[in-house]
Amino acid sequence: MIRKAMKMDADILTDLTFRSKAFWNYSPEQLHAWKVELAITTDYVLENEVFVLLLKSKVIGYYSWLVHDNDTVELGNLFIDPPCMNKGNGKILMNDFLERVKSSGKKKIRLFSEPQVEKFYGQFGFQTIGQHQSSIEGRFLPIMELAL
């Protein structure tokens, strides 16, 4: 089941985000450096489109999107709890996200991908259009777009 996130979900989403990032073997120091950048605040939940995936009433994943202009949205986050990865949950979230954006009338989606999941987004038709310097020196995030 997917539902709109509520402000009480903010801490749960922050914890899930850090567990998911840690899955990619980032150092504890790097994760600590991202403490503010990766935090999901109650204001973030209230001001953006944030949806959670539940399994037996437990949040196992979420995504969020931000409106940039009349035509474009940005996928801000898409995270799955590591024990629930590689079981189709990312696909469930992406399909829900794509349907919601299409029904909103937007024409383009942009995202900054973790390098390890660029291929995942490619499966949904996203094309890499450039690179963005991340907060880690020498590490670049693929910039991807999908025309709707």
Image: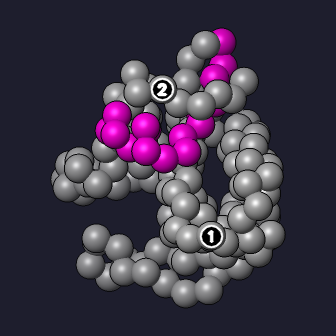
Q: Position of residue 72 (x, y in %)?
A: 62, 70
Front-most of 82 and 42? 42
For residue 87, say whether it is visible. yes
Q: Which residues are magenta?
A: 41-56
For the point 66% across and 19% down, the residue is 55
- Along the horizontal axis of the image, is 29 left or right of 61? left
- Amino acid found under the numbered disc labelled 2: Met
Specify the quadrant of the image occupied by residue 143: bottom right
> In this picture, is 121 found above or below 52?
below
For the point 80% across and 52% down, the residue is 103
Q: Dot 1, crowdedness within 10 Å: few (<14), some or many (≥20)? A: few
Membership of 38 in magenta stretch: no
Tell me the tag on residue 6: 2
| Residue lying at the far front of the rendered structure | 70
- Along the horizontal axis of the image, is 142 left or right of 95? left
**Which part of the image, by quadrant, shows the N terminus?**
top right
Q: Look at mark 1 in the image and give the residue it sits on.
A: 70
Q: Position of residue 43 (x, y in %)?
A: 34, 39
- Disc 2 secondary structure class: loop
Tags 1 and 2 in contact by the CB under 8 Å rule?
no
- Amino acid found under the numbered disc labelled 1: Asn
Query: Rounded to the nearest whole Å, what is the CA distance between mark 1 and mark 2?
Result: 25 Å
> In this picture, is 49 found above or below 139?
above
Front-most of 36 and 115? 36
For the point 51% across and 52% down, the residue is 77
- Does label 1 or label 2 sit earlier along the sequence? 2
Q: Dot 2, crowdedness within 10 Å: few (<14), some or many (≥20)? A: few
Q: Position of residue 94 (x, y in %)?
A: 72, 50
Q: Position of residue 78 (x, y in %)?
A: 56, 49
For residue 119, say whether it is visible. no
Mark 1 vs mark 2: give the one in front: 1
